[in-house]
Amino acid sequence: MSKKFPDLISAEQYFHSKLFQKKDVRIVRGKGALLYDENGNEYIDCEAGHAVVNIGHSHPKYIEAVKQQLEKLVMISPSYPVDVRYKLLKRLAEITPPSLNQTFLSNSGTEAVEAAIKLALAANRDKKKPEIIAFKRAFHGRTLGSLAMTHNMKYRKPFLPWLTQNVKFASFGDIQSVKELLNKNTIAIFIELVQGEAGVYPAPYDFVKELRELCTENDILLVVDEVQTGFGRTGKMFGFEHYGIIPDAMCLAKAIAGGFPMGAMISSEELFERMLVGEHNTTYGGNPLGCAAANAVLDIIKEEKLVENAARQGKKILSNLHQLAEEERLIREVRGKGLMIGVEYRIKVKDLIRKAQEMKVFLLNAGLTIIRILPPLIINDSQVSKVLEVMHNLFL
Ligand SMILES: Cc1ncc(COP(=O)(O)O)c(C=O)c1O
């Protein structure tokens, strides 16, 4: 290595722009819920690429499915019907409520959210100044439409001149605050049923029920952003299943294709009909390789009962950490659903995460004081025990 770059980590830090702060570990491969560094050290991965690798790393069935498709057909425009895409679209329709029967395939979560914003706007062409209600603490992405609904100033500030003023932020969990913002221009409410990036805040049950009723009564769209909660993460296939509601549209990404970049916006035929051909599209959306990856993910989730495992392991971790919180004064709160877990501390968590890494567990922060635990859904009993042991030993 040169003088300027004593090692590969600092070299990558330089060439990769300054938008990322690099960790001081070089991961070379993954297997299941485990990651391995260049020296052969083994870590339990409780980040899962930010809730992406739900089926675990390097799953043999996933590799085989992607390989086979790679040899057949990687890319063809969405105008050409292909079996592998049809199979995925049909399956998405089957695992969602009957009213959510059509899908737009994108390449990321933010694009799925952008598509839902455009769907809501296209369905309300008559409104002169259409408004959307989003929530305080919400994270919906970083492109300019989704960023307008992302609440944290840390992400918004330099871009405010280009962000629409037509998004109003209600307090999460407070139906009265939603009612106060609702007016004749409101076209949609966007919600994460478990706010993820903010630090894992599950929405209260009654609040979501009331939100659904409010949207129906006022003829506005309820859009659930399941980019992070989707595909078993919360112990149900989708987060809305915890609440017994059916949204008008949902946004998916992250785990959908096991790490292959893909997003999806699912809604009804009736709403999609309000958008005209060409009013929305993307070159790579629905490419056969991504569809093969997503089909493999759905197979693995079903065959290996990963939703059930997420519910079971999540319950175990949560109950253990709730107990720990009773003994450990520095823990302010433990929250979560399934394997989407947040532990809020009374101190900054940077050093705790570092210590966990030394004990061979990767944890993820949310802001300064929250640790997130988001392992692959295939995590097993002994790996969960090890993660809990590390969580108990963070202050030793
Ligand atoms: C709830 C939610 N929506 C949207 C996004 C944006 O997804 P992407 O990073 O794939 O654009 C994220 C990413 O963390 C998210 O958590």
Image (cartoon, rainbow, N blue to C red):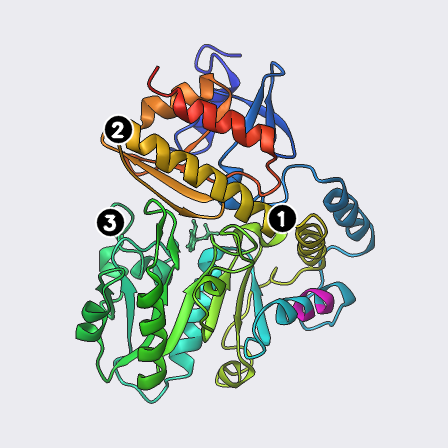
Could you say whether the residue bearing mark 2 is in a helix, strand or loop?
A: loop
Question: Can you tell which of label 1 and label 3 is closer to the viewer?
Answer: 1
- Give the percent coordinates (x, y) of residue 365: 37, 35
Q: Is residue 10 visible?
A: no
Tags 2 and 1 touching, CB below 8 Å: no
> What is the span of residues highlighted in magenta in the rendered image?
86-90
Q: Which mark is residue 306?
A: 1
- The residue lying at 52 percent from left, 80 percent from top is 272
- Give the percent coordinates (x, y) of residue 58: 69, 37
Q: In the rendered structure, does residue 165 fall within the stretch colored magenta?
A: no
Disc 2 crowd rating (10 Å Cα; few below 14, some 14-19, many 20+) is some
Figure quadrant of residue 61: top right
User: Can you identify the residue that label 2 sits on?
Assistant: 348
Q: Which mark is residue 158?
A: 3
Q: Amino acid at mark 2?
A: Lys
Q: Amino acid at mark 3?
A: Pro
Q: Amino acid at mark 1?
A: Leu
Nearer the N terminus, badge 3 or badge 2? 3
